[in-house]
Image (tube, rainbow, N blue to C red):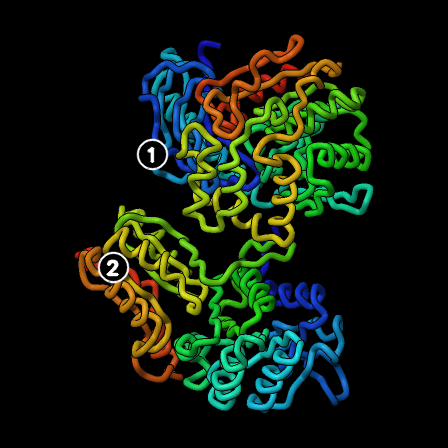
């Protein structure tokens, strides 16, 4: 099987879904690039080149460069989805959601409910998230908890290239609005990715490591950090189960509760701000449903409650690191 | 001969294996061992299995520490008789490890064999892995329901030392097209014939497992010139019973935890089923078209929960040498099906194996294949 980057895997899923279904279109800022300008067409393929090559293959009718007006093109995507297309809109940085949130949470997320189940909104919003890119406070946030809060949206966080391809194909085939979070620090990371199209179902968490001592529940880029910690601690005979949630909405509560109960010691790792985030949500779930199986308090490893710093030294301290995750695991083991 | 030093090295189980771990030694230093004796438990990221000694003699050193990850080809143990002094053994180990470094450096730049694909009549793609070059008809490995060419990781390389070998993915499986046609044993056999035609293979030594065993038997009885010998491992088609718990569980379970007990039905020792093996099956099942292909095959091959194609009469028409290998603890297809087969069919039963004797008793199965494919 060929090794492909996270970027290639996403590009391949888009290409294969566009080949499979002519209703799939792409829209966003510079998803092709070069529109109306002399010189190279398809000059950008998105800010980090993820959609490169799709416009020459499918044409400007299906790969639409939009003005820098998220409120307009996210709204247009919601309307296109409601009237028969399957748009994949690229919200360049999730930090820009502020200007198009009404189109997402008051429109796209509500159509199915408010039209008595008769409307479908098969729309995907691909968006970049995450710190570590020296991009400062307005281009580095992890805002997936905000979307997870809204009924009617599905929220997807692929943790590697294999997951990205299968989960994006599933997102495009899903009939509900899906927010697909790509971590900008992962685009060059590789994994073995089949050439054939495949899908990974929503709401089925992936247990990436199995151990008897501690359960680490996480998502997105943090899965890789947690796997590293689990592999390191395995050599010291500390066994960690690592749960990659894959989707925060729908949430695989069955796997969360089962794996939490199995070890009785839980660490939840979440790159977002600590208040009202996934770590708080999952910890609350475990405390309400599996409290009697816990051997001690749950530890949450998150970013601090402050904007992402521009200072490289501070940004490095801001992101949950393998060292912080390891310390939390040792703490719940009583060896901190 | 008496003064020879033999090395026992980390085996290579399948193309993907680059390193392994001796999880436990079953012998102590100083023990006298026989070739074929189980001497260690070895685990890779894909699989855990017992390791059988390739040599006989006195074990002078156990070099590999339990739990240590070592590259393929690394020294695990040294076998030599007492005529050789400890200093010579030490020198041998040091020299071996020097040579290993060079070998690993060379291996890093080597081109690894990769599966290839060929288009067969009707436009379908069939993936196969070719290993080894030998004279005479090649050995062709045919997997069972839900399997693929990687199922032969303990066998193909061993046979490739003396034969040209191919392991193929039948339609609906592995990297081949997911169109299974009518979905029965006949459709699979036609695809095998079309692949042999596309590959210009006139005649082959067939090694078929389970459904692949039925395919090999059907071909050996209907197109006798194409088959030089047939080894049927836990073949389907010998009786009506089949575990639908296995077949349906394989198709339906999408979570690793629920698929694990299903895959454990394949083997006598459940520890053989590793996380990566489960993950590989899940990844296969997620490919577009696989679910429909598996269901189509199930509905055609096992309507009403029983095997549709009973091929016991086919044995009478087989001209090539043929043998049947079964595991006494098979929970998918009853080993009893191999009893009282017509004619002089040679049947080998492995008491400690389940549905996968080619994995569970690999070296014995390899020897039987080599004998019939001579």
Say which mark, if any, is on residue B27: none
Q: Judge the density around disc 2: few (<14), some (14-19), many (≥20) Cα neighbours within 10 Å.
A: some
* Quadrant of the image occupied by residue B230: top right
Relative vertical location of residue B128 with respect to residue A120 in this rendering, above or below: above
Residue assigned mark 1: B66
The relative height of residue B103 versus residue A334 in the rendered view (above or below) is above
Q: How far, Cα to Cα, is label 2 from label 1?
A: 38 Å
Q: What element carries label 1?
A: loop
Q: Nearer the viewer, residue B92 or A30?
A: A30
Q: Position of residue A300 (x, y in %)?
A: 27, 68
Tell if the residue under mark 2 belongs to the same chain as the one under mark 1. no
Which residue is drawn at the image coordinates 62% and 74% (left, top)? A49
Which residue is nearer to you in this view: A18 or B60? A18
Determine the residue positioned at 49% across, 72% down.
A181
Residue B174 seen in the figure: no
Q: Can residue B334 be seen in this view?
A: yes
The label number, if any, that marks residue A290 in the structure image:
2
């Amino acid at each position: 099987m060929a090794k492909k980057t996270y970027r290639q895997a996403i590009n391949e899923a888009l290409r294969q879904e566009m080949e499979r279904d002519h209703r799939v279109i792409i829209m966003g800022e510079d998803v092709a690039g070069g529109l109306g300008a002399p010189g190279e067409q398809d000059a950008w393929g998105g800010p980090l080149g993820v959609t490169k090559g799709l416009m020459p293959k499918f044409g400007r009718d299906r790969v639409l460069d939009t003005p820098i007006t998220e409120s307009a093109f996210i709204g247009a995507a919601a309307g296109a989805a409601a009237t028969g297309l399957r748009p994949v809109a690229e919200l360049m940085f999730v930090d820009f959601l502020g200007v198009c949130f009404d189109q997402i949470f008051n429109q796209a997320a509500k159509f199915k409910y408010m039209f008595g189940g008769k409307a479908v909104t098969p729309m995907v919003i691909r968006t970049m998230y995450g710190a570590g890119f020296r991009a400062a406070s307005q281009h580095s946030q992890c805002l997936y908890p905000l979307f997870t809060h809204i009924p009617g949206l599905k929220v997807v966080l692929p943790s590697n290239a294999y997951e990205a391809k299968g989960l994006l194909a599933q997102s495009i085939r899903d009939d509900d609005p899906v927010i697909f979070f790509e971590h900008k620090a992962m685009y060059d990371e590789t994994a073995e990715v089949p050439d054939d199209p495949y899908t990974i179902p929503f709401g089925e968490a992936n247990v990436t490591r199995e151990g008897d001592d501690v359960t680490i529940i996480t998502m997105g880029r943090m899965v890789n950090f947690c796997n590293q910690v689990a592999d390191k601690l395995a050599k010291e005979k500390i066994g960690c189960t690592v749960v990659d949630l894959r989707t925060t909405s729908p949430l695989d509560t069955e796997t969360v509760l089962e794996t939490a109960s199995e070890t009785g010691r839980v660490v939840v790792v979440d790159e977002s701000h600590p208040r009202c985030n996934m770590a708080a949500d999952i910890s609350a779930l475990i405390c309400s449903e599996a409290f009697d199986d816990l051997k001690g308090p749950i530890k949450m490893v998150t970013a601090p409650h402050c904007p992402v710093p521009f200072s490289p030294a501070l940004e490095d301290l801001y992101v949950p690191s393998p060292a912080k995750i390891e310390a939390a695991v040792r703490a719940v083991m009583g060896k901190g | 001969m008496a003064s020879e030093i033999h090395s026992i090295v980390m085996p290579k189980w399948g193309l993907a294996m680059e390193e392994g771990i001796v999880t436990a030694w079953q012998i102590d230093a100083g023990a006298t061992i026989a070739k074929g004796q189980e001497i260690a438990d070895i685990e890779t990221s894909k699989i855990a299995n017992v390791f059988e000694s390739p040599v006989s003699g006195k074990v002078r050193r156990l070099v590999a520490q339990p739990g240590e990850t070592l590259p393929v080809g690394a020294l695990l143990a040294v076998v030599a008789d007492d005529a050789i002094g400890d200093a010579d053994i030490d020198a041998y180990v040091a020299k071996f490890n020097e040579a290993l470094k060079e070998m690993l450096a060379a291996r890093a730049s080597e081109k690894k064999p990769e599966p290839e694909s060929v288009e067969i009549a009707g436009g379908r793609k069939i993936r196969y892995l070719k290993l080894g070059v030998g004279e005479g008809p090649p050995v062709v490995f045919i997997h069972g329901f839900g399997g693929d060419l990687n199922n032969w990781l303990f066998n193909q390389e061993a046979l490739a030392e003396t034969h040209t070998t191919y392991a193929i993915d039948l339609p609906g499986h592995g990297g081949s097209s997911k169109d299974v046609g009518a979905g029965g044993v006949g459709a699979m056999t036609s695809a095998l014939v079309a692949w042999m035609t596309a590959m210009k293979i006139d005649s082959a030594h067939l090694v078929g497992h389970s459904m692949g065993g039925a395919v090999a038997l059907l071909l050996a009885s209907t197109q006798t010139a194409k088959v030089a010998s047939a080894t049927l491992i836990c073949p389907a088609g010998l009786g009506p019973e089949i575990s639908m718990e296995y077949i349906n569980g394989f198709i339906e379970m999408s979570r690793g935890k629920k698929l694990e007990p299903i895959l454990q039905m394949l083997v006598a020792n459940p520890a053989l089923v590793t996380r990566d093996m489960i993950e590989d099956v899940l990844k296969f099942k997620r490919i577009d078209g696989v679910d429909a292909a598996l269901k189509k095959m199930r509905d055609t091959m096992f309507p009403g929960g029983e095997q549709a194609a009973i091929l016991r009469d086919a044995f009478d028409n087989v001209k090539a040498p043929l043998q049947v290998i079964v595991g006494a603890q098979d929970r998918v297809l009853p080993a009893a099906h191999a009893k009282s087969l017509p004619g002089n069919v040679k049947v080998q039963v492995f008491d400690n194996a389940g549905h996968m004797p080619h994995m569970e008793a690999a070296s014995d199965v390899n020897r039987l294949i080599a004998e019939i494919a001579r």
